[in-house]
Image (spheres, rainbow, N blue to C red):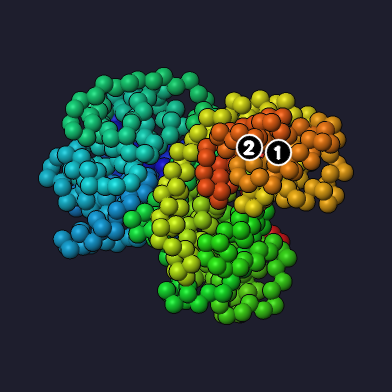
């Protein structure tokens, strides 16, 4: 998730670009850049670091630039956050900024290399820049159209060419908004960047190309057919606009999960081969020689790790140890062990400390993280990035589901590498995985029902969450979310553990959330708590004929393979916690006593 801006007007482009970029910095902040037409030439400034640092370089150049330019603030997905990888990328007379993931970039890059194009970055966007540059013969709109017709994946593009005062934009599965002003027109990834300049916007749709100058905006589809401008008046304030109109970042980020899961999967799934295309820093022989996996993590990331404890023995024949990083006590990691750390920020102090203690054992180390170039990535042999973009809300939402999906991908990779998982089973899992973003959207459409449940039990002083197998770690995560943002005491348990003590706390009307999307044993646990007076809220698969007979309330979720239903249940529990906290009038994005990243032990 990155931020794109563009300006075509009568004022100097530089100050407008930097102001709008700063308003999008919550979308990415590891590098930034601008491209401006200066005296007919193409001026490109870019650097790793914050936008303010780049702005100083621009100001040192005096009153550079004309009234046309594009800018970008980056959240790295392909390539580390370096100046070389920062956008814009240039090919000949063309400069391009891009948000999204080009799935067939390797194939395109090989073709471009054969044709003599030179690459200076590790990004998929440079492929797009060279592709547009290869088609550019003076008509930038036609060059962009020809290029995107060869691209597979998601993109929001803004491009300009030396000697021109026009911007050309295109969109597919990544947001792009055009702002209509007086004597100036704009483009941005989010409305929030544009509000100081205009409140009249046009939201681009997939498969559309726009040509923008200071006088007008022309919108066409990929076949060249002229389209009407569907003008919308925005009445949000700037703060609400940064949240895309959602009352809290947490709710916005919950609703971003179809997109973030799609980004995590993109380019990594080969349904035809029944395999996963991720580099884990191990040769084929090293994968075959693996004997076990040890995982260290904290908090929400620990709950994701517990999922692997259930999945990897089945998928890859590998036993799994999971330890809270602050309690990591391995004095011996034997050869044949893969050490995996999971940390959203890549800076979690306890996890980093555990990885340092394990560095002397000579085992292969990999990480799952959301932040390119973070400390953990420099301590391991390879990193699997979750590609979720910045997460502003303190309570993890999209980064947790990104971790779950990354762990599933890794499990399939290991299973195929060890010849434990058959081609046919792997292929079926991957096909179902590609359906997951759409199924998450179906869960989000149950939000009104989940809101009603949350409001009903908002004044409870205790919640229980129960699940079995893959859904036990999700019960833990559901309880943590309820504690974090609603301040209600909540506990997560394996369903069978209730009778070993926790039943003593079940009283009349106690809400018990049962994750019941698969398996019959959980139904016996539901009956146990119902017999003690609990109100059972069951999250079950659509069409379950039995669950409504034993639960007080049933929320139906899409039918999915058990390990994938863990992701669907997660999204439902995030909504439950969010609406509970909202009903209690609490500061959801900044819960008391908590920080987004724990950087001290």
Q: Which residue is the site of mark 2?
A: 539
Dot 2 or dot 1: first in sequence order is 1
593 horizontally vs 189: left or right: right
State the quadrant of the C terminus.
Answer: bottom right
Q: x%, y% of residue 388?
A: 49, 48
Of 470 and 24, the residue lying toward us: 470
Q: Residue 578's quadrant in the figure?
A: top right
Is residue 522 among the parts visible in the rendering? yes
Q: Residue at x 25, y 34 (%)?
A: 209
471 above or below 571? below
- Residue extending furthest toward the left: 137
Marking on residue 473: none
Q: CA distance from mark 2 to mark 1?
A: 8 Å
Instruction: Report crowding for label 2: few under 14, some 14 to 19, many 20 or more residues within 10 A (C-alpha).
Output: many
Of 49 and 232, the residue lying toward us: 232
Q: Which residue is the site of mark 1?
A: 513
Of 20 and 63, the residue lying toward us: 20
Of 334 and 545, the residue lying toward us: 545
Secondary structure, mark 1, is: strand
Is residue 123 among the parts visible in the rendering? no
532 above or below 57? above
111 horizontally vs 100: left or right: left
Q: x%, y% of residue 316?
A: 52, 65
Q: Residue at x 15, y 61 (%)?
A: 115
């Amino acid at each position: 998730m990155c931020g794109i801006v563009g300006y075509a007007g009568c004022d100097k482009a530089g100050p407008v670009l930097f102001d709008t970029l700063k308003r999008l910095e919550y979308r990415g902040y590891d590098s930034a850049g601008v491209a401006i037409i200066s005296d007919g030439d193409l001026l490109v400034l870019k650097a790793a670091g914050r936008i303010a640092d780049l702005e100083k370089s621009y100001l040192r150049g005096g009153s550079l630039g004309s009234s046309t330019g594009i800018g970008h603030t980056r959240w790295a997905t392909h390539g580390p956050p370096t100046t070389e990888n920062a956008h814009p990328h240039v090919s000949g007379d063309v400069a391009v900024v891009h948000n999204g993931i080009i799935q067939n970039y390797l194939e395109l890059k090989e073709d471009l290399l054969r044709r003599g194009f030179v690459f200076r970055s590790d990004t998929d966007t440079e492929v797009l820049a060279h592709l547009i540059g290869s088609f550019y013969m003076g008509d930038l709109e036609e060059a962009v159209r020809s290029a995107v017709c060869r691209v597979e994946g998601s993109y929001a593009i803004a491009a300009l060419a030396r000697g021109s005062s026009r911007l050309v934009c295109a969109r597919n599965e990544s947001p792009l908004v055009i702002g209509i002003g007086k004597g100036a027109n704009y483009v941005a990834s989010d409305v929030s960047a544009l509000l100081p300049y205009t409140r009249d916007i046009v939201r681009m749709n997939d498969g559309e190309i726009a040509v923008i100058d200071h006088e007008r905006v022309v919108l066409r589809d990929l076949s060249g057919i002229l389209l009407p401008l569907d003008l919308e008046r925005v009445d949000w304030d700037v703060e609400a606009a940064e949240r895309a109109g959602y009352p809290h970042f947490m709710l916005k980020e919950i609703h971003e999960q179809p997109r973030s899961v799609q980004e995590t999967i993109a380019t990594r799934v080969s349904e035809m081969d029944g395999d996963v295309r991720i580099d884990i820093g191990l040769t084929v022989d090293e994968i075959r020689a693996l004997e076990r996996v040890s995982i260290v993590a904290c908090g929400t990331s620990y709950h994701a790790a517990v999922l692997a404890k259930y999945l990897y023995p089945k998928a890859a024949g590998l036993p799994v140890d999971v330890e809270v990083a602050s309690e990591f006590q391995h004095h011996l990691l034997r050869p044949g062990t893969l050490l995996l750390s999971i940390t959203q920020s890549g800076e979690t102090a306890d996890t980093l400390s555990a990885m340092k203690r394990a560095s002397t054992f000579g085992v292969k180390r990999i990480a799952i993280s959301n932040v390119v170039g973070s400390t953990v990535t420099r301590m391991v042999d390879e990193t699997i990035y979750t590609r979720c973009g910045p997460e502003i809300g303190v309570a993890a939402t999209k980064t947790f589901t990104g971790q779950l999906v990354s762990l599933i991908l890794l499990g399939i990779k290991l299973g195929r590498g060890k010849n434990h998982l058959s081609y046919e089973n792997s292929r079926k899992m991957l096909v179902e995985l590609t359906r997951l973003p759409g199924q998450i959207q179906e869960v989000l459409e149950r939000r009104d029902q989940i809101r009603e449940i949350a409001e009903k039990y908002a004044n409870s002083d205790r919640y229980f969450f129960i699940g079995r197998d893959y859904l036990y770690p999700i019960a833990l995560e559901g309880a943590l979310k309820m504690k974090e943002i609603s301040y209600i005491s909540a506990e997560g348990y394996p369903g069978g553990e209730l009778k070993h003590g926790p039943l003593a706390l079940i009283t009349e009307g106690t809400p018990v959330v049962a994750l019941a999307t698969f398996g019959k044993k959980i139904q016996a646990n539901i009956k146990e708590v119902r017999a003690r007076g609990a109100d059972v809220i069951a999250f079950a698969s659509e069409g379950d004929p039995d669950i409504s007979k034993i639960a007080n309330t049933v929320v139906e979720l899409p039918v999915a393979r058990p390990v994938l239903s863990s992701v669907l249940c997660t999204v439902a529990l995030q909504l439950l916690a969010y609406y509970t906290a909202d009903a209690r009038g609490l500061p959801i994005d900044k819960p008391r006593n908590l920080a987004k990243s724990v950087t001290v032990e």
